Image (spheres, helix red, strand yellow):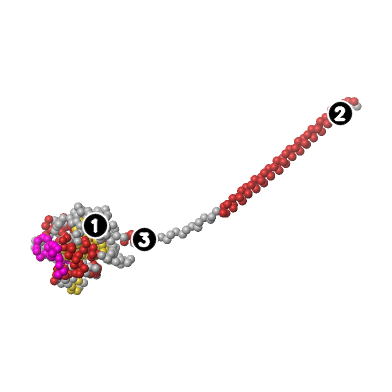
Amino acid sequence: MKSQQNQNLPTSMFKPFYSHLQFTNALSCIIIFGCGLTLGIVLTFHLQNLSFNLDFTRLDFSPTQSLQPPPPAPQPAPPAIRVGLAEYLKPAPVTHDMEDDELLWRASMSPRIREYPFERTPKVAFLFLAKGPVPLAPLWEKFFKGQEGLYSVYVHSNPPWNETEPEDSVFHGRRIPSKGVSWGNVNMIEAERRLLANALLDVANERFVLVSETCIPLFNFSTVYSYLVNSTQTFVQSYDLPGPVGRGRYSSGMFPHIKIHHWRKGAQWFEMDRRLAIEVVSDRTYFPLFQRHCRHNCYADEHYLPTLVNMKFGASNSNRTLTWVDWSKGGPHPNRFVRNEITVEFLERLRDGNGMRCEYNGKATSVCYLFARKFLPSSLDRLLRFAPKVMHFN
């Protein structure tokens, strides 16, 4: 019995200890649970507060954004400006840097459709082949006055002369890139082709008149313009002349392209239409023959155009010139007129054809000359005095 009591004694002694340990464990679990619960509550509150702050921030900026002006509505693109043929129809500047071969190539271009797809007013191109200035310019100024849009002016003068005309002059800025010209030399034809080529760059130029610095008009602009624009023919003097100053100037080096029966002579002062002008600047067959074989006493300016026109365009040519020249005194140069020779009667006689009858568009007329030469600068004052009365310059 005593031994059994002794065996149960340790168990009874440790019961309070185990009970205390269980209480401690339970209390620890309660504390941990309470801490976890408290942490959960704190975190939940904190997250709710953060979400509120974010919502508040968004709400706080929304009114500011709504007060900003709305972006501008896109503007419609401006309507495109139609260019069409405007750039092509614009006359090329007279002062360019093209070489002769470039210029002639550019001028030789021609549309094959004859009808123009735009309203076109034909102009008359006046080609002044001058040694230097145009001393009779004041007379020409009166001639051109009030006729803007119906004419063009081009001046070829020897390079040493480079002075400019007054800005209000029709000759101002109208000097083309020029090269030296010698009397009777083939370079005179080169200058004529240069003038034609520059004038062809203006598609409105329909008729082309070659004049010199000593030429004068015999009629007012309206008469000259109507005569040229309404003509069915060109005016290049061309005739066959046996003898040393005619056929005698022919060179066999031009054979077989030009035979002696083709050879013609005539005045260099021409008037032609656009079609013929394009053919002249495009000629690479006959003009090179004149450059090689028409030298010294040949005088290419008296033979090139008359021969070319006779061979290729004779049917549409009148075979006469519109520029009157006085050869009555003989010699290599025509008569020159000074101040005291200029009278009303003299000018009236020239206007009446100087007794000559000719044909215009199939009908006989006494108006055979529209221009005359050679008038020296001393004749200018009388020409200006008589022009309103005789030539009807208004």
Of marks 3 and 2, which one's residue comes earlier in the chain? 2
Give the distance between the C-alpha atoms of the residues marked 2 and 1, in whole angstroms. 148 Å
Q: Is residue 245 visible?
A: yes
Q: Quadrant of residue 43?
A: top right
Q: Which mark is residue 165?
A: 1
Q: Which stretch is magenta?
A: 321-345
Q: Are marks 3 and 2 in contact (CB under 8 Å)?
A: no
- Mark 3 nearby-residue class (10 Å; few <14, some 14–19, many ≥20): few
Q: Is residue 323 magenta?
A: yes
Query: What kind of element bears circle 3?
Result: loop
Residue drawn at x 28%, y 61% is: 202
The front one of 27 and 176 is 176
* Residue on which the image places disc 2: 8
Q: Which of label 3 and label 2 is nearer to you? A: 3
The front one of 11 and 355 is 355
Q: Are marks 3 and 1 in contact (CB under 8 Å)?
A: no
Numbered-mark total:
3
Residue drawn at x 42%, y 61% is: 79
Residue drawn at x 76%, y 36% is: 28
* Residue type of the residue flagged with mark 3: Val
* Residue type of the residue flagged with mark 1: Glu
Q: Which mark is residue 83?
A: 3
Of marks 2 and 1, which one's residue comes earlier in the chain? 2
Q: Is residue 40 magenta?
A: no
